[in-house]
Amino acid sequence: MTITYPDSTSDRTGGAGSVRAPLLDISNLAVRFETPDRDVWAVNGIDLEVGAGEVLALVGESGSGKSVSMLSVMGLVPTPPAVVSGSIRFDGQELSGLSKREFSAIRGGDIGMVFQDPMSSLNPVHPVGKQIAEAFRLHRDTNRKEAMKRAVDLLDRVGIPNAQRRARDYPHEFSGGMRQRAMIAMALVCDPKLLIADEPTTALDVTVQRQIVSLVEELKDELGMAVVWITHDLGVVAELADRVVVMYGGRVMETGDSTDVYAAASHPYTAGLLRSIPSLDTPTDAQLPEIPGTPAPILEQLVGCPFHARCPMTEGDCTGSLPDLEPVGGSGHASACLHVSSMGSAEDLWPMDVTELTESGSTSETVVTISDLKVHFPSRRKSRKNRHSYVRAVDGVDLEIKHGQTLGVVGESGCGKSTLGRALVGLVEPVAPAIQLRGEPLDTSRGLHRQKIQMIFQDPFSSMNPGMRVADIISEPMRIHGIGSAEDRLDTSLKLLAQVGLPDDAATRHPHEFSGGQRQRIAIARALAADPEVIVCDEPVSALDVSVQAQIINLLRETQDERGIALIFIAHDLAVVRHISDEIAVMYLGQVVERAKRDLIYDDPLHPYTKALLAAVPDPDPSGRGALAPPLVGDLPDPADPPAGCRFNTRCPVAVPGLCDVEVPQLREIESRRWVSCHLVDGPGGQVSEPQAGSEAWSSVSLSEPKQQNNEREEDE
Amino acid sequence: MSAAEQSIPTTRRRRRVSVADRLGLTGLIIVVLLVVMAVFAPWIAPYDPTERVGTPFQPPSAAHWLGTNDVGQDLFSELVFGSRVSLTVGVVAALVALLIGTSVGVLAGYYPKRLGAILMRTVDVVLILPFLPLLIVLAAYLGRSLINTIVVIGVLIWAGPARIIRSQVLSLRSREYVLASQTMGAPDRWAIMRHVLPRTALLATGTFVRAVSGAILLEAALSFLGLGDPIQKSWGSILFWAQSRGAFLTPAWKWWVLPPGIMILLASLGFALIAFAMEERINPRL
């Protein structure tokens, strides 16, 4: 059997690359993986070009073929099991069919790569500088000393403070953000013409993500290289990309200049993605528009639009013919939708459910009271000064959780938000009893009182026993607490399955037969089974595909509305919690720095850290380019040894020396139900006490600042 | 570009039978044959192995395929009935080892701090004990009986399985679904019985089969030294008598020493091959 995809190269309208030959020209690329059980058609005939100096964003969910297509550019797709066809031209040279040796000359030379997980891409037993120098010596005829100098220069360039010294450090001594910077330095070592970045920020905090995006933006201007940025998140690349290619099911769905794609999405999928991603300006009183279903792997040759099963405007011919990219408007904007002409506005296509959810009043009773919660872990690294040092994961947190309301807990990784959640469900022991459920103190002992607080984990793949059937998984809490007879439990399980939108026959299947979104539905059903009063959701959507996140958020909201459950929604991103939370607590290094009603936090953030977090949220609107606040500098300090004074003072752009680094700010209620812990925020009204100095400092902060500071420091030594 | 250049050829493929699978099948056949021999011993053996059925020290003949021993018992019948003893001791001793090993492994893995430390140091002690001398001392002290042989072997070989199972439990106890059951309010007993044990069962089966192979060898060694049950002769006991009647130095080794030796080898090899194939499939990938 052979497959042939129509060659649409001739139909292509010239974009930026039409003036001269593009740097990277992929035409009719197809990749299929043959495994003993089944074939997976990962890439199904895509055409793509990248001009010199251009930033192309390749957007798609897992299984869309975005990574596979770029890996085949670099010759990194293993054949077999993969079968690759089509033509890949880079800088005038045909890449398909090159030998391994020829490929490795190009890889790391003219094409640099950055991968998602910087820890696994760096060799843990060699110093970072040496690894970068080695990459240089692989491609250039130079001695060890020269190469090391180059490595240090580059580390300095990508913003590693004290590069000379840090070059001798090992990867585990770097933070996640610094490792990714080091990976970028390694990719740049031979002045590549093209940098391929495969989800380089997905494993990082939003604040660090902003830093990396800004860094790449600076570097490509400086070095004049082209960048292909692979991501699942349309928001991340909005500020960066010149052109966007949206992929689904191994096909290009839409391509065009980023302003066109974001402002006038011309494919139902793109429009749906843009509508369903929670952002800072979607209305909160209605449900998020959701794209139904889940992305499925393609197991046979495509004969129709891969998106037809989830598309609201599918017609009969969508399954029968493979749509090609057709130009819409000018300047290279093209869409692979047969019915693009009849596509209405994004709002009509993906309407928001207007049935307003009942807004729960602020008068409702308090279910959980947390007062002065402290969770300390013995530190593995014993400092010489203090033999019994502790990581203060949570260090004095007061919160209340009200019936039928949602408390959003936000902060970078390492801020203690997950530990807070775990303390609530009894997985970790607080230093002193601090949690009360309706006046009853809670401890870590197992037993009936655990029934009322349940938890939903981040990873729906690992939080279920793969050997159990779904019905048994859902009924587990009931069996633990001995609720009902076996028939009752099965009955309840089936009811819960229906409630979370899964069919009855799911009950007898095993979790591996479900997609991530469906498993998270099972996890919700399991959490509901014990009839709890509180559910702790620890990043419940961050492991899910973008198009599925809205479904889960909506389901959680509906469930809460029906049952009056209190939710604690833990997330690293302010945009995600906004849609579901009534109140938000922002955490930094084990402490709550600001806590207020949702709209207050978003409309009028007071604490500098809250402002920084808000600024770091990727905004899927390229027109806002440049208007954003600068990214937060640096990384989270070591929680075992928090900075003196205000814990945020080391990264705070408005910190006042002599005050913020000496005195510990208290969390004060500056107005009714609004708490801030900052010296510079004054009483009611919440004005920054030194508005002049504050705003100036805020706007003058830039990425170059830490480097200058470090230079100074170096000179001092 | 022509259509031919753009096409992806579909290659024919077939699930490959791995070397491990083939070896495992060989082992399975050997074991099944031996078990059949043990179960149907009275029908297969031409004589009662405890009866004098001919003149002593006969070479092989049509009446006595492997000749007779020093008291005129039929050696072939002894060999057939010996499989019952050898296999029973091997399997039951391995079961004893598995029981101890799994309990210790699960407890040490689930409570790795204090209890785990104590248990694992015990395991270390058992592992470094000089095996055979201790085996001999224990067997000699406890007396010669089938039960004692089983107990002695079982008590000595549980440490290996315990270590393997502990490492699996260590990884299982931090899986999110075990944490999840804890957040639901499950006691440790629940997590162990519902989540940890079922997920270790397969691994335990693999170590069990391997232990059977070792136990058969140990039983042979004990019996060869004359520490086996004097009433029920195993393959090892046949060798013991052959040795004490000087068969090793006479032409009789060909029918008195070689056959039980080969049976011991086959039994041990058969279980070892099955264990190898199982471990290829079961063992967690690193």
Image: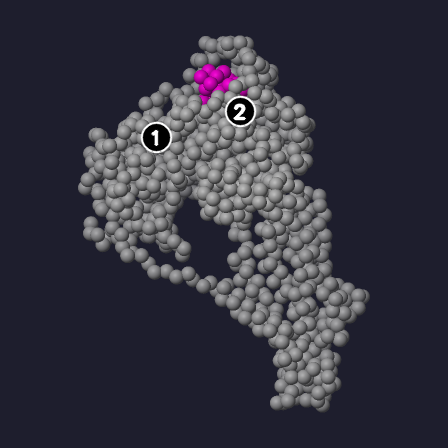
- Left or right for B222, reference B172: right
Magenta stretch: residue A569 in it?
no
The label shown at residue B275 is: none
The figure's colour scheme reads one colour
Mark 1 crowd level (few <14, some 14–19, many ≥20, 10 Å Cα):
many
Q: Tell me if label 2 and label 1 are in contact, CB under 8 Å.
A: no
The structure residue drawn at horizontal position 68% and vertical position 79%, both measured from the top left corner, is B78
Give the chain of mark 2.
Answer: A
- Residue at label 2? A405
Q: Quadrant of residue A421?
A: top right
User: Where is A491 relative to A352, above or below?
Assistant: below
Percent position of residue B137, x then y = 78, 65
User: What quarter of the picture does the N terminus of chain A occupy?
Assistant: bottom left
Give the structural element (helix, strand or loop) at label 1.
Answer: loop
Of the image marks 2 and 1, the number of the one nearer the N terminus: 1
In depth, the one of B253 and A624 nearer the eye is A624
The image shows residue A37 at horizontal and vertical percentages of 41, 55
Q: Residue B6, relative to residue A257: is it above or below?
A: below
Mark 2 falls on what kind of element?
Answer: loop
Magenta part of the chain? A595-614
Q: Which residue is mark 1?
A: A350
Task: Tell me which amino acid carries mark 2.
Answer: Gln
Q: Residues within 10 Å of mark 2 (few under 14, many from 20)?
A: many
A636 or B183, nearer to the observer: B183
Q: Amino acid at mark 1?
A: Trp
Left or right, A284 with respect to A487, comes to left
**Above or below — where is B252 with respect to A487?**
below
> Is B145 drawn above or below residue A435 in the view shown?
below
Magenta span: chief secondary structure = helix
Residue A219: x and y in percent read: 36, 30
Task: Kindly tell me whether residue A95 is visible in this rendering.
Answer: no
Label 2, label 1: how many angstroms apart (C-alpha)?
A: 27 Å
